[in-house]
Image (cartoon, rainbow, N blue to C red):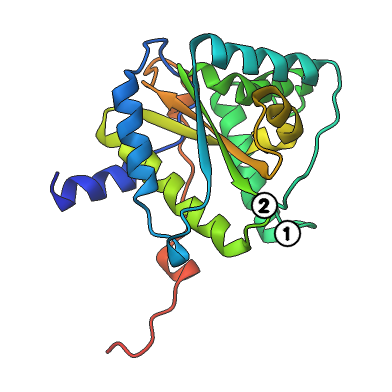
Amino acid sequence: MDKSTLQDIIFTRSSIRGFLGEPVPKKTIEKVINLARSAPSGANLQPGRFTVLASTALNALSNTLVEAIQKGRPSVSEYSYFPSPLPDHLLARKRETGFGLYETLDIARRDIQARKKQFENNYRFFGAPVGIVVSIEKNMGKGCFMDLGMAIQNLFIGAETEGLSSCGIGALANYGDLVHEHLQLSKDEIVVCGIALGYADPENPANKFKTPRMKLEEFSDFLGFE
């Protein structure tokens, strides 16, 4: 693959929230996971673990999560994903993203039930044939979360090179204790996020939604250049 193709993938990739039911070969998934692990990490600690689920194993986890949520199971917070409180400029960006997705799906802002139903799709891994649970050892520092993030990004880009699409699911951590219990993860690990992986459904309206990116001058400074 040439550099221009890789750059195209990085610029055009987006989070996919609707998948075809077509299964993904295990060898393809193994290749993508190995690409994730090739990411750099401080002192080569290679933090994080990927638990890959498909078929009945994925359905069982999804059903467990959805059933618990519908019964009103309280969420947990094993680590801080967003700043609290969320500053106004970040809150505005968060709302823009949420409202943009709902508008694409023709869900009214005040239609709370429809919004809840759509949000439940996070726990169904958006219908993807492969679901990945990402976890990390509890005693890892903030830098290790950064390293794990680079590994996840490698996974996202690697998936695209194999004709696959993906979506990160931060909401999975809201019920990390239940995921931990269901999968019998090590007591030393916490759930960081989930990942939906598979072939994108081109007819699903959710996949038409694209989040905007900040302009270069909004997030960067250049010093010492003429």
Residue pictured at 50% horizontal, 36% vertical:
50
Residue pictured at 37% horizontal, 13% vertical:
23
Of the numbered discs in the image, which one, if any, rests on residue 92?
A: 2
The relative height of residue 7 versus residue 31 in the rendered view (above or below) is: below
Q: Of the residues shown, which amino acid type is indicated by label 2?
A: Ala
Quarter in which the N terminus is drawn = top left
Q: Is residue 75 left or right of residue 119?
A: right
Quarter in which the C terminus is drawn = bottom left
Rendering coords of residue 160 (x, y %)? 31, 35
Q: In this rendering, does residue 14 appear at all?
A: yes
**Label 2: how many Cα within 10 Å (few below 14, some 14–19, many 20+):** few
Q: In this rendering, does residue 13 appear at all?
A: no
Q: Nearer the viewer, residue 103 or 59?
A: 59
Q: Is residue 81 left or right of residue 50?
A: right
Q: Which residue is mark 1?
A: 88
Q: Secondary structure at mark 1?
A: helix
Residue 112 found in image quarter: top right
Residue pictured at 41% horizontal, 37% vertical:
14
Q: Nearer the viewer, residue 157 or 117?
A: 157
Residue pictured at 48% horizontal, 58% vertical:
45
Q: Is residue 191 left or right of residue 41?
A: right
Q: Of the residues shown, which amino acid type is indicated by label 1?
A: Asp
